[in-house]
Amino acid sequence: MQLTNLIALFSGLATATPIVVDGFASGPSGHEVSIEGLAFAGSGCPAGSVSGQLSSDLTTLTLLYDSFVAQAGNNIPPSEYRKNCQLNVKIQYPSGWQFSVFKADYRGYAQIPTGDTGTCKATYYFSGDSRQAN
């Protein structure tokens, strides 16, 4: 008899580090960088379940997913076996500056019976660019 598997991912940290471009010696003051919009959709992130915060030093974007839960097992519908969330972050930053995903850190918990497996996968890309990174 298979027990119910539960995977909940409550937060992901993506680090966006400003990169110096041609002659700029220091980073933006902080008043020039902001999150202008956070849009998300998918089975793992219903409306109102994702929030974001940019750190005061402008190097870390923290995202909290309140409802990212996947389940499997007896009496669990197949639609619950796998969850996804497409997240779009609109960041305002000074002309001449750029940002990138430097590192990502995921935290959460899983209750997985012996012999079963669970997987968490993330793919990153910039709008308009066909290249992706996992």
Image (spheres, rainbow, N blue to C red):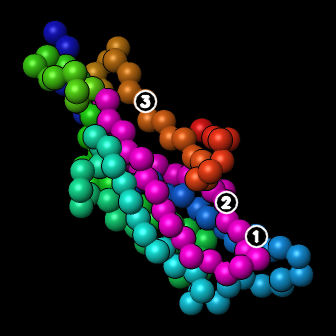
Asked which secondary structure carries label 2, the reply is: loop
Q: Residue at x 67, y 60 (%)?
A: 100
Q: Which sits earlier in the primary sequence, circle 3 or circle 1? A: 1
Disc 1 packing (10 Å; few <14; some 14–19; many ≥20): some
Q: Residue furthest right?
A: 23
- Report the residue at 44% width, 35% height from top: 120
Residue most extreme to the top: 1
Whole-angstrom CA distance, mark 3 to mark 1, is 32 Å
Q: Amino acid at mark 3?
A: Thr
Based on the picture, tell me whether residue 102 belongs to the magenta stretch: yes
Q: Nearer the viewer, residue 15 or 79?
A: 79
Q: Residue 126 placed where, x, y %?
A: 61, 53
Residue mark closest to the camera, 2 vs 3: 2
Q: Evaluate if marks 2 and 3 touch, with contact meaning CB atoms under 8 Å apart.
A: no
| Residue position for label 1 | 19
**Label 2 neighbourhood size at 10 Å, few (<14), some (14-19), many (20+)?**
few
Determine whether label 1 and label 2 are within 8 Å by CB: yes
> Please, is residue 111 above or below residue 20 in the view?
above
Figure check: 95 above or below 72:
below
Q: Nearer the viewer, mark 3 or mark 1?
A: 1
Cα distance between the residues tagged 2 and 3? 25 Å
Front residue (pair 107, 49): 49
Residue tagged 3: 119
* Magenta residue span: 82-111
Q: Is residue 72 visible to us here? A: yes
Helix, strand or loop: magenta stretch: strand
Percent position of residue 18, x then y:
70, 71
Kindly identify which residue carries mark 2: 100
State left or right for residue 79 relative to residue 52.
left
